Image (cartoon, rainbow, N blue to C red):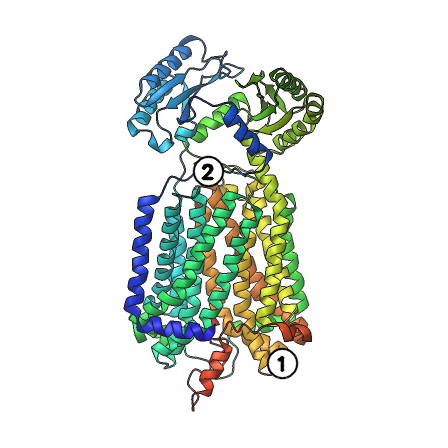
Amino acid sequence: MSAFLYRLGRFCYRRRGAVIGAWLGVLVVAGVSAFALMKPFTSATAIPGTEAQRALDVMEREFPSAGEEHVTGTIVFRAPDGRKITAGQAKQDVARVVEEADRAPGVVAVTAPSAEAGNVSADGRTGIAEIVFVAEKADGIPAETKQSLEKAATEARSAGLTVELGGAAFNTLPPVMGPTEVVGVLIALAVLVLVFRTLRGAIVPVATALVGVAIGVLSLLALTSVITMDSTSIILAVMLGLAVGIDYALFIVSRHQTQVRQGMDPEESAGLATGTAGGAVVFAGATVVVALAALAIVDVPFLTVMGLGAAATVVVSVLIAVTLLPAVLGMMGGRIATSTVPVLARRSRSGTRRTDGSRTPGERWAAGAARRPWLVLVVCVLGLGVLAAPAADLRLGLSATNDPHSSAARAQKMIDEGFGPGHSGGLVVLAQGENKAIVTSAARELADRIEGLPGVAAVSPVVPAASGKAALVNVTPSSSPGSEETTRLLKEIREVRGGVETSTGTQVDVTGTTAVNIDVVDKLSAALPLYCLVVMGLALILLTLVFRAVAVPLKAALGFLLSLGASLGVLVAVFQWGWLAGLLGVAETGPVLSFLPMLLVGILFGLAMDYEVFLVSRMREEYARGTAPTEAMIRGFGHSAKVVTAAATIMIAVFGGFVFAEMQVIKGMGLALAVGVLMDAFVVRMTLVPAVMALLGRKAWWLPRFLGRVLPDVDIEGERLMRHKAASRPEPTAMEAQPVGEVSAGTRLT
C-alpha cells in the first residue's frame, strides 16, 4: 500500500491543476445536487419489527384521521391565580383569540378549550386550543399566518393571560451551527500555526478539511430525497469530518514540511509523506469507517443512516488527504517550509534539531513514566475509574430536539404543569380480532385492569374501529414520557394483557409515540453489548496485524474501555445528575441520548486506534533496530508526542465547540467526544501506554510462532518503501541522518 500511495502522492503533486479542478468539480456537482434534491429533515425514530411500531401501522389503517395530511398546532392559555379560562373575562379573551385564529389565512379549523373535550385542566386555569392548518408540514405555513396568530396571542397576554403557541406547527429547531463551533476551528488553526510555524502551512489542513466536509454534507443533503434523515446525522458528519480531516492533513503535512526543511525535493517529499504518514491515515480512517458502518448490525434505521452518513464523510476526508492535499502542497512548493510572518519565521529558523543528545520534552515525559510505572498505572486507572463511576447510573432515553427557549417548549411546559407530565405522552392499547363484540369487550376489560395500575392518571373510554376488527384505549400516565415510572407502566400493561388475550382470543399491543420511543431505547440497550463486542474484536484483530504482537492490542483495547467509561461517566454526571449543567447550558436533566453510547464506541475506537498506531509503531521500529525495550519506548514516544498532542488538541477543540450548541442532542455528542478524546489521548495513550510498555519490556512484542507465520505484514507506515529508497541512494540524505527527538509523527518509520 505504501508504494501505491507514494506514486499517488507524486502524481497528484505533478498534476495538481487537474486534481484540484476535479475536486472542485465534485464540490460543484454535490452542491447542485443538494439544492435540487434535498428534502426537509425528519425526526422519526421508528424501528420496523417492534411491537409499538407494528401496532402503530395497524392504527393508521384502522383509525384513519381526516386531518392527518395537515400539520397541527396548539394555543395554550393560562389564567391568573384564582381565575378560570372557562368563566368571566378570561373566557371572553380566550374566545376572541380562537375566533381570530379561525379567521387567519391557512387555518382549516380551531377547536376551542372546553371541559367536555378534555382540553381544560382540572383546576380550570389551563386550556388548549387545537389548530389544523392547510399546510402538510410546519415549514409550509405562511409567515403571515404565524404573524396573525402571534398577534392574537399578544393581545390576550396584554389582557392578563399567559399564552404560548406550540405543537408541531411551532416546534422549531434551534440553529445547528453557531459561533462557538467556529471558535473550535479557530483554536485548531492556532494549534496548527504553533506546530508548523507558518501561517500558510496551518491553513492547508483546515482548508482541505472544509472541502471534504462540504462535499460529504452536500452529498448527504442530496440523499434526503431518497433516505429519511434527521439533522443530527448532518451535525455528526460535520463534527467528525472537521476533526479527522484536519488531523489527517496534519500528519501528512507535518511529515512533508520536515522533509522539505531538511532539503528534500518537494515533489519527492510529497510522495514520501503520502506513502508513509498517508498509510497511517488510510488505516485510521478505515477503522473509523468500519466502526461507524457496523452500526448497521443494530438494525435501527435512523442509527444506520447516521453511522453510514458519518462514515461516508470520513471516506471523503481520507481521499482528500491522499489526493487533494498533495496537489495543494504542489501549489505551494518549497514555501511550505518558510513563513513571511517575522515571528513565525524566527521560530521556524530556531526550530532546528537537537544535536547535543539531550532529551526532548516528549522523551522526558516518557522517561518519567518509565521510572515509576506502577505509580502511573495506579493513578491513571483510579482517576479514570472515578470519572467512570457515574456511568453505573446510566439511563438511556430519546431527548427532545426542539429549542428549549422557544414558544413551543414553553407551551409544553404549561401543558405538563396544568394537565400532568403524562398528558402529551400517552400510551395507546390496541386490541385486534375478528369479532367486533369480543374485541370491544376485551378492550373494556383491559381498560378496567389498567385503571387500577399505579402510575395511571386517566383511562379513556373504548374507541372501536369502523371495521369492528380493532378497538383502542388511551392511557395517560401520571409521569413524563422519558421517566422510569412510564417505562415501568408500559411493562406492567404488557404483563396484564396476557390474561385478556388468553380469555378472549384477541391480540393486544401497546403503542403510541411514548411506547415507540421506549421500544427504541430497549432495542438499543440490548444491542449495545453485541456492538461493543464486534468493535473490540475488530480492534484486537487490526492491532495484531499492525504490531505483530499480542500484548499491545490487549493493552490498547483495555485502555479504550477506560476512556469510554470516563466519557460516559461525565455524560451521566452532567446530563442526568446536573453537575455543571448551568455552566454548560443544559436546559434540563434527563436520560442520556439512547444512541450516544454506540456512537461513542464507534468514533472513539477509531480515534484511539489512530493515536495508538502513531505512538506505538515508532516504538516498535526502535525495538526492531536493537534498542533496549524501555529506551525504544522513550525514543519512539519522543518522535510522535508533539504531533499527537497537536492532533488531540484539535479534536478536543472541534468537538468542544459543539458543547455550547443550542440543541441538547448536539451538546451531548460534543461533550462526550471531547471528554473521550481528552481522556484517551492524554491519559491513556500518552501517560498509561508508556508506563505499561515499560512494565512489559520485551513481553510487549511477543507473538506466538504460528501467528507470526500466518499474519500478513501490512506495513501501513511504509517501512519497506523507505528501506527500498534508502538502498537505491548511494549517499545518506539529510532525512536519513536526522537526529532522534524532533521527527514528526509521520516520520517515525524512516
State the image coordinates of residue 50 (x, y, percent, origin top left). Answer: 59, 36
Which residue corresponds to mark 1?
628
* Label 2: which secondary element: loop
Image position of 482 (left or right of 141): right
**Residue at x 56% of width, y 59% of height:** 680
**Residue at x 40% of width, y 50% of height:** 181
Kindly tell me whether residue 509 is visible in this rendering.
Answer: yes
Farthest residue in the top direction? 88
Q: 45 above or below 307?
A: above
State the image coordinates of residue 99 (x, y, percent, origin top left). Answer: 35, 14
Which disc is residue 43 wearing?
2
Farthest residue in the front direction? 434
State the image coordinates of residue 297 (x, y, percent, origin top left). Answer: 57, 49
Of the residues shown, which amino acid type is indicated by label 1?
Ala
State the image coordinates of residue 515 (x, y, percent, origin top left). Answer: 58, 32
Q: Which mark sits nearer the N-terminus, 1 or 2?
A: 2
Of the residues shown, which amino acid type is indicated by label 2?
Ser
Which of 34/417 is in front?
A: 34
Which disc is residue 189 wearing?
none
Q: Quadrant of residue 578?
A: top right
Q: 473 above or below 223?
A: above
Disc 1 packing (10 Å; few <14; some 14–19; many ≥20): some
